[in-house]
Image (cartoon, grey):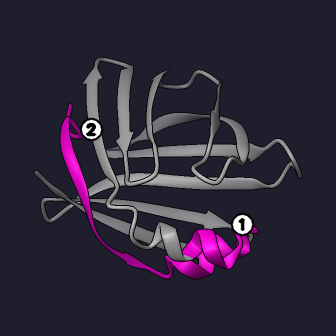
Amino acid sequence: MTFNGAWKVDRGENYDKFMEQMGINIMKRKLAEHDNLKITITQTGDQFHIKESSTFRTKEIDFTLGAQFEYALADGTEVTGSWNMEGEMLKGTFTRKDNSKVLTTTRALVNGELVQSYNYEGVDAKRIFKKE
């Protein structure tokens, strides 16, 4: 239940380079830098409900730790994968449907901030969120 709450994006590290590696065009990358993303997380045991709200879309996701599910990223890229707990960190491993390449995402609390880290094809990035 550590992740419960509303989190607003504050800053990013190498996020543009990560999106470029994902194949996202420059126009969408520039828009994503100013998406004002807010993530609301509700955890009950192994069940998660996540609401993602941004300037461009609102999406709600329900998943169970360890269970595969399908998801479409903000740019429309479809992936399938699952989230698991590794200690105090939430780790997601997702495979793109279009090219079978793997995207890894983690969420961890660091000094009261939610740090969401990404890795795709050797490029690492972070988005840091502050609790509202």
Q: Is residue 46 left or right of residue 112?
A: right
Q: Residue flagged by tag 2: what amino acid is it?
A: Thr
Q: Quadrant of residue 16?
A: bottom right
| Percent of width and height locating residue 92 | 55, 44
Q: Which residue is painted at 86% across and 48% down in the image?
A: 100
Query: Can residue 12 be seen at all in this image of the molecule?
Result: yes
Q: Horizontally, is 74 left or right of 103 in the view? A: left
Q: Which percent across, then down, holds residue 24?
A: 70, 68
Name the residue nearer the viewer: 75 or 88.
Answer: 75
Residue lying at 39% horizontally and 70% vertically, measured from the top left: 34
What residue is pinned by disc 2?
40
Depicted 40 relative to depicted 61: above or below: below
Return the residue found at the far right. 99
Can you see residue 123? no
Asked which secondary structure carries label 2, the reply is: strand
Q: Residue at x 13, y 59 (%)?
A: 112
Mark 1, Cα crowd under 10 Å, few <14 / some 14-19 / many 20+, is: some
Give x and y (percent) for residue 66: 55, 25
Quick one: 56 or 88, which is closer to the camera?
56
The quadrant in which residue 39 appears is top left
- Give the mark count: 2
Q: Which residue is mark 1?
A: 22
In the rendered structure, which segment of residues is drawn in magenta?
1-29
Q: Earlier in the sequence, mark 1 or mark 2?
A: 1
